[in-house]
Image: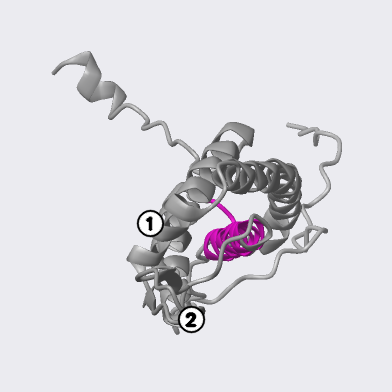
Amino acid sequence: MHSAALLGPAPVSTVAVSLAPFRLLRAAAVSATVLCLAAAAHVAGGGTMPATGVVIGLSVLTLLPVTLLAGRKLGPTTMAAILAGSQLALHQAFTVLSTTAVCTEAGHHAYAGAGSLECVAGAASAAGVAAHGPAGHGAAMVGAHMLAAALTGLLLVRGEEAVWALAAWLRPLAKLPSAVVLPIRPAHTAPAPGALLRPRTLCQLKLEPLRGPPAFSFH
């Protein structure tokens, strides 16, 4: 028989895996903050918002990747990547999917006010805004998005650290006490009917005869 078999199986090392606390709540908070600030920066830069249904769809699309990344702690690098990528993506989505109509004069006539206007909505309006708008309009909007991302990143990183610190403080309180295993005691068995227990006494009841001097015989 080998020595390994005598020693028994080797102990298996267990690795403690700490789950990310409040994953869905953290992802929803980050996504909502990103979407709101992207919308505010887009409007501040001179853009218009798309329809409500489009905004809801964009919020769902923003929540999905953030939920995947929230499985671990969102550090400064990850948070900066989320904010920068989402600001650029949402800026393009808001610009393309906005419903602002762009009206251009169809023709020039000699009479004042005789010209007709052609209005185009949707994605074509976004192209019209880019073509007819001032040259610095797009740069101002992108700058507003980046400034919002930088300020939001500082707040979200601090909030992420606070949530993980709270989870580390609450984790010992959430552990249930382990069950105490009591040793199994043997059942009490009654003595046999024929077996009588003799009481033990401290003194000896039987008296031995005293031994006297030896007797002398006379012949």
**Label 1 environment density (alpha carbons within 10 Å; few <14, some 14–19, many ≥20):** some
Question: Does 65 sit left or right of 150 as displayed?
Answer: left
> At 64% across and 35% down in the image, what residue appears?
76
Secondary structure that dominates the magenta span? helix
Q: Is residue 139 among what the camera can see?
A: yes
**Label 2 environment density (alpha carbons within 10 Å; few <14, some 14–19, many ≥20):** few
The quarter of the image holding the C terminus is: top right
Q: Which residue is mark 1?
A: 127
> At 58% across and 32% down in the image, what residue appears?
77
Q: Nearer the viewer, residue 205 or 41?
A: 41
Give the SS element for disc 1.
Answer: helix
Image coords of residue 211 (percent x, y): 81, 42
Q: Is residue 182 among what the camera can see?
A: no
Q: Nearer the viewer, residue 118 or 163?
A: 118
Q: Nearer the viewer, residue 14 or 11?
A: 14
Write the start and end of the magenta stretch as one range.
20-42
